[in-house]
Image: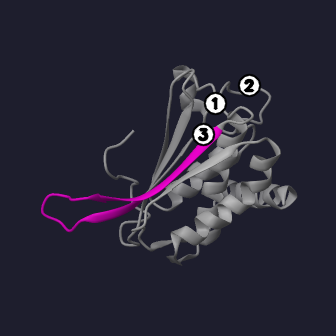
Amino acid sequence: ERMGALLDDLIRVTALDSGRLELTRESLDVVKVVEDAILGVGAQFREKGKNLRLNIADDLPTVQADRDALRQILGHLLNNAGSASAIDGEVTLTVQRETEQPRGGPPINYLFISVRDSGGGIALEEQPRVFSRLYRADAPLIAGLGDTGVGLSIAKALVEAHGGRIWVNSELGSGSTFSVLLPVDENHAGGNGSGPARG
């Protein structure tokens, strides 16, 4: 499973670098995609005694998105949180609907995803680097971050390709929360990534 995940990452990186990233949008049941992502990280969490707490809303909207890309976004965020958290630590996955009411326009629905770890937190000056590729020799690893390669940079690219945005909130000693906001309606996806003011 890990080799397959690494191969998927390599394929995504190659597509991103060559400008050939193509998304196949379809109507997705978000809960099923979340379940697939959780299964993908289950072994890692069990091996290290990590606890995964779920906070998934009952009224999740259907999302127009690329199934593999959404599963990868979730997988990378969960992998990072699991690696950042101590043994017997807890990771919390929240998935819910967000709605913005623009003045004079119809409401816009978003899918909000957040993954909170119980790690040591990321220093403020290091936070701008968390979505960079960290495998280069001139890019030392970031304390409090679980990702040691390209996972979060891929997640960021896939989120932005869907017209969404991704950010991190973190305090030293208090862990980190990575959040994603994705437009639900295909008419709003792929735009400038603007959404409700958060983060």
Instruction: Find residue 180 and report its horizontal and vertical position in percent.
Output: 48, 51
Q: Is residue 105 magenta?
A: yes
Label 1 vs 2, first from the N-terminus:
1
Q: Nearer the viewer, mark 3 or mark 1?
A: 1
Judge from the rendering whether residue 76 lies leftward or rightward of residue 57; answer left or right: right
Residue 92 in view, yes or no:
yes
Judge from the rendering whether residue 84 lies leftward or rightward of residue 104; answer left or right: right
Whether the residues at callouts 1 and 2 have beta carbons within 8 Å, the answer is no
Q: Which residue is mark 3?
A: 131
- Per the rendered image, the range of residues in magenta is 90-111
Q: Nearer the viewer, mark 1 or mark 2?
A: 1
Q: Which residue is mark 1?
A: 119
Q: Amino acid at mark 1?
A: Gly
Q: Which residue is mark 2?
A: 140
The answer to which of 95 and 126 lies nearer the viewer is 95
**Residue depicted at x 42% and y 65%:** 189
Would you place residue 29 above or below residue 115 in this image? below
Residue 15 in view, yes or no:
no
Q: Amino acid at mark 2?
A: Pro
| Separation of residues labelled 2 and 3 (CA atoms) | 13 Å
| Separation of residues labelled 1 and 2 (CA atoms) | 18 Å
Q: Is residue 53 magenta?
A: no
Q: Residues within 10 Å of mark 1 (few under 14, many from 20)?
A: many
Q: Secondary structure at mark 3?
A: loop
Quarter of the view holding residue 13: bottom right
Q: Quadrant of the N terminus?
A: bottom right
Q: Secondary structure at mark 2?
A: loop
| Separation of residues labelled 3 and 1 (CA atoms) | 17 Å
Q: Residue furthest right?
A: 3
